[in-house]
Image: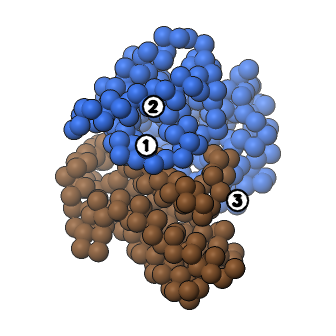
Amino acid sequence: MALKRGRAIAAIEEAIEEIESYFEMVGFGAEGLGGADQIAQNGDSDSEEDDGSLEESTFDREEIEVAIDVFVSRLAENGIVPKPTLRDRPSLLWVLERFFPPKHRILERARSFEADIKGYFDVVSYDAMARASSELAEIRDILKGEAKANG
Amino acid sequence: MDRSPRELRGALEVKLKRSTSRIRRQVDEAEGIVVFGSTAAGVDGPFSDVDVLCIGRYTYGRLKSEEVDLITIPVATAQSMSWCQSELGTHIAKYGVPIEGRVSLASCRPGAAAIRGKRRRISAFMRALHTSWPQLEDCFRVKYSTKLRRECQRLILMEGGSPVPPTHLLDCCWGAFPESSTEVCATLKSLSPTGNLGSAMDLFERIAEYLVMHRGVSPRVS
């Protein structure tokens, strides 16, 4: 049983790269630019034009959402989680809840991650992305530790 | 199917009782309240939340619970051109029902910034799906083709100068008029990533296939 759980957790840890690679792509990797490239990519300030406030780097919620769905799909394909339906509202938290008890700190991290990437009218702020990136790194570390402990 | 302000006030009060104290406080402080979305259109289900716009001495904000999705805006914003021409502003001016206070929302055509934002959202999805589509489980393909279809419908309406209607109406139109799928496909094609035309066309064809397969079927997609 422990071996089975250990394998599942190792598979989740591997699959999480689907989400991490999106964060790296927009500059939040280990040696990332901290989103500097995204400023140039988006380069707009639709809602801030009128009040003259400073332009802030923002990120599209849609792209993160697709990365998470690819992560869930990969796990379903490998039989780690059941084939999802839209009714399940599959997410990173939905995956982790299957393998960790309700009060585990990894679930707390996953909840914070999901709150951060929710964004505001589908736009995620730089600060929220930075927080989400650290939370994802913490989740990965916990998974690594758990996978090792479960052999 | 439209409901009277009185009915809507009753529906909101029921939901507020089950909502957070923070949301109740914000609604209590409103100078004007408008209900919009599925509840205002009379197409809500027992588990639908109530979409509410509160105008008053607030900063621009959003509070969401399972019962109520609340947007607060300052009075000055409600009268500003950027709000009146936004996707949400034009939608509420046309389909929202004022239930409390003096609310006068100018009816405008969706502005250039709103149309640009919508195009950007569709492009963002297309960009992300460009490489990911083959890896996605079937339920996600249905979700994204539905989302993209609705977003394209909204964009077409906005470009034609109309506010976007409640989602339920978009879904009804999709099943009813064959020409709507041609228009949606053309919009989708125009916003496909152009870097690699071959794979962009492949993605477009796959999404179009899902649109046809699920014609008249509207899964619950948030």
Q: Which amino acid type is shown beneath numbered disc 2?
A: Ile
Say what secondary structure mark 3 lies in.
Answer: loop
Mark 2 vs mark 1, CA separation in Å = 9 Å
Chain whose colour in the figure is brown:
A
**Residue A40 horizontal/vertical position (percent):** 19, 52
Cα separation, mark 3 vs mark 2, equals 40 Å
Q: Earlier in the sequence, mark 2 or mark 1?
A: 1
Residue placed under numbered mark 1 in the picture: B133
Residue under the point 51% across and 78% down: A143
Helix, strand or loop at label 2? It is: helix
Q: Earlier in the sequence, mark 1 or mark 3?
A: 3
- Left or right: residue B213 versus residue B43 is left
Residue B129 horizontal side relative to residue B196, left or right: right
Image point (26%, 48%), residue name = A42
Residue highlighted by disc 2: B207
Q: Nearer the viewer, mark 3 or mark 2?
A: 2
Quarter of the image with the C terminus of chain B in it: top right
Residue B20 disc label: 3
Q: Categorize mark 1 by other alpha carbons within 10 Å: few (<14), some (14-19), many (20+).
A: some
Instruction: Give the residue type at disc 1.
Output: Trp
